[in-house]
Amino acid sequence: MSNTTEIHVDPEVPLVRITREFDHPVDKVFRAHTDPALVAQWMGPRSLTNEMVRWDCETGGGYVFVQRRGDEEYAFHGSFHDVRPGELIVQTFTIDGMPDGVALEKLRFEPLDGGTRTRLTTTSLVDSFEDRDAFVAGGMETGVVEGYERLDELLDA
């Protein structure tokens, strides 16, 4: 893969910033984040499958999805606070069973090279450094890196 995923853990606030470029225009990258059939094909590590229970990616909407590997099951939910097509998604992210560990996430889509490429910058802010570190240690790097590799493959197809 020519594009690498950069994960930066902020030392001053409990925030993680993820930056990734894609060799596709913003409209395609944005659609892959908002269409539940597409999201299910790329989100998370290769070893997990996704079931999109609900995915209403619009301002005021929400989502519930489940990831599975054999007998393991991980459920997530959140709300879409602001969705601006081709530009921005602001959402919450919660792992079921950890109700106090809510992350506030902002996904910013930026056109590059005359609109032929996209830079996606995601920030995830949580309540404490402990929550942030647990979030990162819980497989974030594998899930994000492999998920974006899968997204590249989907966009290339």
Image (cartoon, helix red, strand yellow):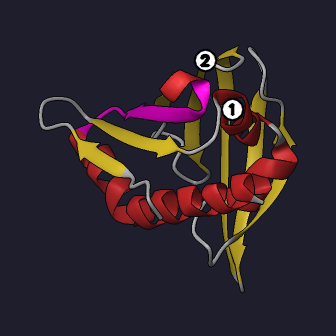
What element does badge 1 sit on?
Answer: helix
Q: Is residue 18 above or below residue 142?
A: above
Side (left or right) of 51 relative to 111: right
Q: Is mark 2 on a helix, strand or loop?
A: loop
Q: How far apart are marks 1 and 2 (CA)?
A: 8 Å
Asked whether the residues under the numbered discs 1 and 2 touch, taking CB atoms below 8 Å apart as contact, a structural biologist would say yes
Residue 112 visible in the displayed image: no
Q: Earlier in the sequence, mark 1 or mark 2?
A: 1
Q: From what the image shows, is residue 25 above or below residue 101?
A: above
The spot of residue 129 in percent (x, y) is 22, 41
Is 12 magenta? The answer is no
Which residue is at a point 33% across and 32% down the rendered structure image? 127
Magenta-tinted stretch: 115-128
Of residue 24 and residue 62, the one placed in the foreground of this image is 24
- Per the rendering, the mark at residue 30 is 1
Return the residue at label 2: 87
Residue at the spot 71% in from the left edge and 52% down from the top edge: 155
Residue at left offset 25%, top offset 44%: 8
Which residue appears farthest toward the front when viewing the image?
A: 114
- The single residue placed furthest to the left in the displayed view is 11
